[in-house]
Image (cartoon, helix red, strand yellow):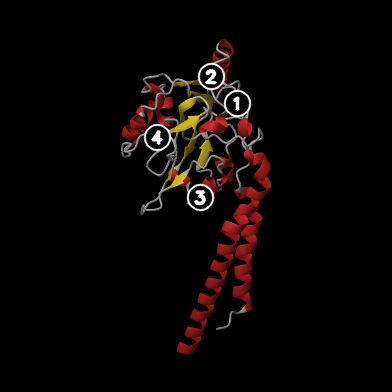
Amino acid sequence: MSVDRRNFLKALGIAGSTLAMGKSFGSPPVSKSDTEFFGILYDSTLCVGCQACETACAEKYGFPLPETVPAAGELRETNEARRVVINCYNTSKGEMYMRRACNHCNNPACASACLTKAMLKTDGGPVIWREEKCMGCRSCMISCPFDIPKFEYNSPNPKINKCRMCYELLLEGEKPVCVENCPAEALLFGKRRDLIEIARTRIYSEPDKYYHEIYGENEVGGTGVLYISSVPFKELGLRTDLGNKSYPEYNKTFLYSVPLVLILWPAFLLGLHSAFVQGKNKKQKEEES
């Protein structure tokens, strides 16, 4: 069936307008001072692997309780029903534990990649996902260097799941449940700049106990969750190849082109479909008359 010239130009018009809009859809890198962000300091030398943090998180947000325990050589990942996990590693100083959850980057790649700003870096520091704004593109999952956001593939109403640093509790002046329930006090909550000073004090006070770096102080532009340990962080499964530049600074050119792929092509096909339907209806009316 043929498409008349007017309807075809309408299709091109839809695509063209989408192209013009494309540059405004990408979320530019956030530019905020990290000095007043809230964060969490995790001291792996104090962690006993009890999973109290996992249990508290699961109970608070209605997830299944942990069914497995940390064991060396068995990597446990976060998923759509588990926001925080504790893993055990064989290190140069014996078995040690490491926490895995969202790191709440100062300039998060997930928020920069989000076309609808469903993933948001809040003024207080937590990176949160907002269901009402999400279009399900999963750009946040692709862009995260820590592979944290998880998608509910088996749900009829899928959501993105990740640690929110108990954002709603923070608004009420309370601490994240993982911090509140850690019996070993391996987790400490506070202003990020204060946590960095505490971490430095611990390292300098016991130089033989600690590895002389704070993971997250500079990695990917800095993160809200900070780590100190007695061994190099690579031995505990943390990525050490990320550099100190935030990811949005690397990929902002690519991210601004993503809307053209996700929006322009479907809009163009929709325009063609509309043109075909209108042409078909017009032909049927002519035949009936």
Q: Position of residue 185 (x, y in %)?
A: 42, 19
**Camera-nearest label, 2 or 4:** 4
Residue 254 tag number? none
Q: Nearer the viewer, mark 3 or mark 1?
A: 1
Q: Is residue 237 left or right of residue 250?
A: left
Look at mark 4 in the image and give the residue it sits on. 71
User: Which residue is labeled 2 in the image?
Assistant: 195
Compare residues 280 and 92 and report the one nearer the observer. 92
Q: Are the residues at dot 1 and dot 4 in contact (C-beta closer than 8 Å)?
A: no
Q: Disc 2 and disc 4: Cα gap in Å?
A: 29 Å
Point out residue 206 in the picture as x, y percentages from the top left corner: 55, 12
Measure the alpha-carbon separation of dots 1 and 2: 10 Å
> Which element is circle 2 on?
helix
- Amino acid type of disc 2? Leu
Kind of residue at disc 1 = Glu
Which residue was labeled with disc 1?
217
Are the residues flagged by discs 3 and 4 in contact, CB closer than 8 Å?
A: no
Mark 1 and mark 4: Cα distance apart in space: 28 Å
Residue at 51%, 52% (x, y): give it. Answer: 137
Is residue 25 visible to the viewer in this orientation of the structure? yes
Residue 27 on image: x %, y % = 60, 43
Residue 238 vs residue 223, the one in the foreground: 238
Measure the C-alpha gap from mark 3 to mark 1.
27 Å
- Distance between the alpha carbons at the discs numbered 3 and 4: 31 Å
Ranked by sequence position, the earlier of labels 3 and 1 is 3
